């Protein structure tokens, strides 16, 4: 969304606008925004100095989406609860300590309160029946409201980097939960420290690397092309280097992403980690990884504001049946490997998968990964079944994009998709079962 100016708003240049973004050091809500009351659907006031919203905000009767991240709000404005059409609310990186019971809009579908100071959530959260996506990483939560057990449509939950000593049993039984991140809580601290300290990968001295171009940047870090140097300073091999940021991301803590990458080990459908860097002049953390062939590309784009929890594929994305099956088999194998190592990926999505067009796929981005105890077989099984639902969404998307879909779909594949998406967690197949059934599809 393009940033507009107050001058444009005041001069009437934005009349009839459906979207508005203002980032100009605002300390008060501009009353001129109400001139757009008949059309405005998306309002982004992130990156200002706002502490309150006006009591008559519901005059924006068509407002569906409101962002106010990076402002000094200390309380989620109660007036939001009076906005009848509002379904997406984002107040990331404020100073919010209190969430009033009335502040949650009745049609709430997507709530972002990442990186605040919230210690408790109101019981009314469990009354928001449309809620699909809830992002709470980087707060001070010690518990979740029991009423959340009624959130039958909740699909994605981020509760990393809080103060939780345990996960409630009702959470693991939510019928549609597929993407869960809970790292960085006391409940898992010992396991996470052990993973970070005991990973069987070599140390790589920072001074033996020569940085090249930036290949990409995400919420947790920056990926560079780099060259490993021989002792005489001559280049030896091209690699990828990911340098992690220190801030809380929407998924959790970058340091724990590194721990998960290290704990994951080697697998043909994971990007190989060659080592972790030491001796960085600013004491930054980083991983040296295999450099991926440029023929690999993202399977899809991330969810949009409208799709909420589902990835967005290119309009012309089509696969032959053998290639779609090969992609699915590879990702299921990678997921099985991770769960055997006590890792839940937490973000098993097409936008985190690279593929080469011939069916070889690589699962990446461990920013939402969490650890579980493989010795607790019942709990480990439950975590795996939650991730199987995410895989079911992926499999459904691939099946929908098989060229000549109607003629190529099989009853066996449709049944597998339905079983993976079952709203009874315990009835979903394991990844062992998934792989066996895919091999026979």
Image (spheres, grey):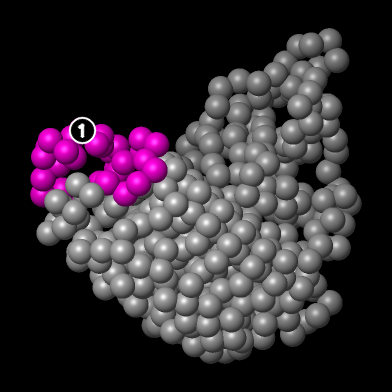
- Residue 97 quadrant: bottom right
Question: From the viewer's perspective, is residue 222 above or below residue 117?
Answer: above
Residue 81: image location, x then y, percent: 36, 72
For image coordinates 81% across by 62% down, the residue present is: 189
The mark total stands at 1
Q: Quadrant of residue 346?
A: bottom right
Q: Residue at x 81, y 80 (%)?
A: 376
Q: Position of residue 192 (x, y in %)?
A: 80, 59
Q: In this orientation, which residue lies closer to the viewer: 115 or 393?
A: 115
Residue at image point 67% right, 76% down: 143
Q: Is residue 425 magenta?
A: no
Q: Position of residue 338 (x, y in %)?
A: 70, 63
Span shown in magenta? 1-30
Q: Secondary structure at mark 1?
A: helix
Q: Nearer the viewer, residue 349 or 218?
A: 218
Magenta includes 26?
yes
Reading the image, the residue beneath label 1 is 7
Quarter of the rendering containing residue 98: bottom right
In this rendering, would 200 be left or right of 310?
right
Above-or-below relation of 409 to 241:
below
Is 149 left or right of 310, judged from the image as shown? Answer: right
* Residue 407 at least partly seen: no
- Judge whether residue 374 can be spotted in this image: yes
Q: Quarter of the image containing the N terminus?
A: top left
Image coordinates for residue 105, horizontal then vertical, percent: 36, 73
263 or 75: nearer the eye?
75
Q: Is residue 238 above or below residue 70?
A: above
Q: Would you say 75 lies left or right of 405 here? A: right
Q: Main secondary structure of the magenta part?
A: loop
């Amino acid at each position: 969304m393009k940033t507009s100016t107050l001058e444009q708003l005041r001069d009437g240049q934005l009349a009839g606008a459906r979207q508005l973004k203002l980032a100009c050091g605002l300390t008060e809500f501009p009353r001129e925004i109400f001139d757009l009351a008949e059309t405005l659907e998306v309002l982004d006031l992130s990156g200002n100095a706002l502490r309150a919203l006006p009591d008559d905000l519901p005059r924006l009767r068509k407002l569906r989406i409101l962002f106010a991240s990076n402002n000094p709000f200390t309380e989620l404005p109660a007036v939001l609860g009076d906005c009848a059409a509002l379904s997406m609310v984002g107040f990331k990186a404020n100073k919010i300590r209190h969430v009033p019971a009335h502040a949650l809009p009745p049609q709430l579908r997507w709530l972002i309160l990442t990186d605040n100071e919230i210690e408790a959530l109101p019981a009314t959260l469990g009354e928001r029946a449309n809620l699909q996506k809830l992002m709470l990483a980087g707060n001070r939560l010690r518990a979740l409201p029991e009423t959340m057990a009624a959130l039958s449509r909740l699909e994605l939950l981020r509760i990393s980097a809080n103060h939780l000593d345990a996960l409630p049993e009702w959470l693991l039984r939510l019928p549609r939960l597929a993407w869960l991140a809970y790292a960085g809580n006391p409940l898992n601290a010992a396991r996470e420290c052990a993973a970070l300290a005991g990973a069987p990968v070599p140390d790589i001295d920072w001074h033996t690397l020569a940085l090249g171009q930036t290949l990409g940047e995400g919420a947790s870090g920056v990926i560079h092309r780099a060259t490993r140097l021989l002792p005489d300073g001559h280049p030896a091999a091209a690699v990828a280097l990911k340098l992690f940021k220190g801030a809380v991301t929407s998924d959790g803590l970058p340091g724990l992403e590194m721990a998960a990458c290290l704990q994951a080990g080697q697998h043909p459908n994971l990007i190989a980690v060659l080592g972790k860097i030491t001796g960085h002049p600013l004491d930054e953390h980083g991983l040296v990884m295999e450099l991926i062939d440029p023929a690999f590309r993202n399977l899809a784009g991330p969810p949009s504001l409208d799709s909420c929890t589902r990835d967005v594929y290119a309009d012309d994305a089509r696969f032959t049946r053998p290639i779609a099956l090969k992609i699915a088999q590879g990702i299921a194998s990678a997921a099985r490997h991770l769960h055997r190592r006590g890792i839940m990926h937490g973000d098993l999505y097409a936008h985190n998968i690279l593929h080469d067009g011939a069916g070889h796929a690589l699962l990446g981005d461990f920013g939402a990964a969490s650890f579980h105890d493989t010795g607790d077989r019942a709990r480990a099984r439950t975590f795996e079944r939650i991730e199987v639902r995410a895989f079911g969404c992926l499999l459904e998307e691939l099946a929908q994009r098989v060229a000549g879909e109607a003629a190529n779909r099989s009853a066996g594949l449709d049944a597998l998709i339905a079983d993976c998406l079952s709203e009874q967690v315990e009835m979903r197949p394991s990844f062992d079962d998934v792989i066996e059934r895919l091999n026979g599809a």
